[in-house]
Amino acid sequence: MAGEECVRRTMTVMEEMETKVQEYEVVVEDLEDVQGRLEEMERGVEDNTRVKGEQEMHLRALEKQRLDITDKLSKELESSKNELTTATNKLGIVEDQRLDGIAKIEASQKRVEELEAHIEKEKKRTENEISARIASFHRFEKGFLAKEKMTMDRLLCA
């Protein structure tokens, strides 16, 4: 019986070994699957690393472009501010000149009105003087003609 027991144990050990071999084969298959997924993931990581590098280069290019545009816009803004200041200063000068011009026009207009009033006053004074002289002349003429008539009448009567 010792031989049978030895065979039974051997059979049990062989069955256990077969189970262990099957477990080993399952583990090997799982390991191969895991290795396949790992390789696939490594390829994905490599692709992602490559894409990340490309994206970082693109990001740096965009950042440089943003800085260039910001610098350009800053310069243009400063230039625009300078132009606005210049235009504002010129506008102030033009406004001052315009106000001076208006003041000169108003002063000239006042002077013209004063001259017109003086001319009108002189015109009335002259018209009155001429009317007075004409009236005086008419009086003189009447007196002269009356004396002349008297003289003629005397001469004719004499």
Image (spheres, rainbow, N blue to C red):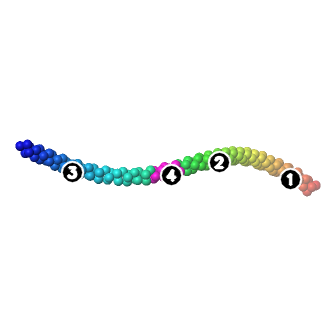
Outermost residue on the left side: it is 1
Observer-side mark, 4 or 3, equals 3
Q: Could you tell me which secondary element the residue under label 3 belongs to?
A: helix
- Distance (Cα) linking label 2 and label 4: 37 Å
Compared across the picture, whether 117 is left or right of 8 comes to right
| Residue 62 is covered by the magenta coloring | yes
Residue 145, which numbered label?
A: 1
Q: Could you tell me which secondary element the residue under label 1 belongs to?
A: helix
Q: Give the mark nearer the N terminus: 3 vs 2.
A: 3
Q: Which residues are magenta?
A: 57-68
Q: Give the mark nearer the N terminus: 1 vs 4.
A: 4
Q: Is residue 90 visible?
A: yes
User: Residue 17: x percent and y percent?
Assistant: 17, 47
Residue bearing mark 3: 25
- Distance (Cα) linking label 1 and label 4: 114 Å
Residue 90, which numbered label?
A: 2
Going by the numbered disc 4, the residue's amino acid type is Gln
Going by the numbered disc 2, the residue's amino acid type is Lys
Residue bearing mark 4: 65
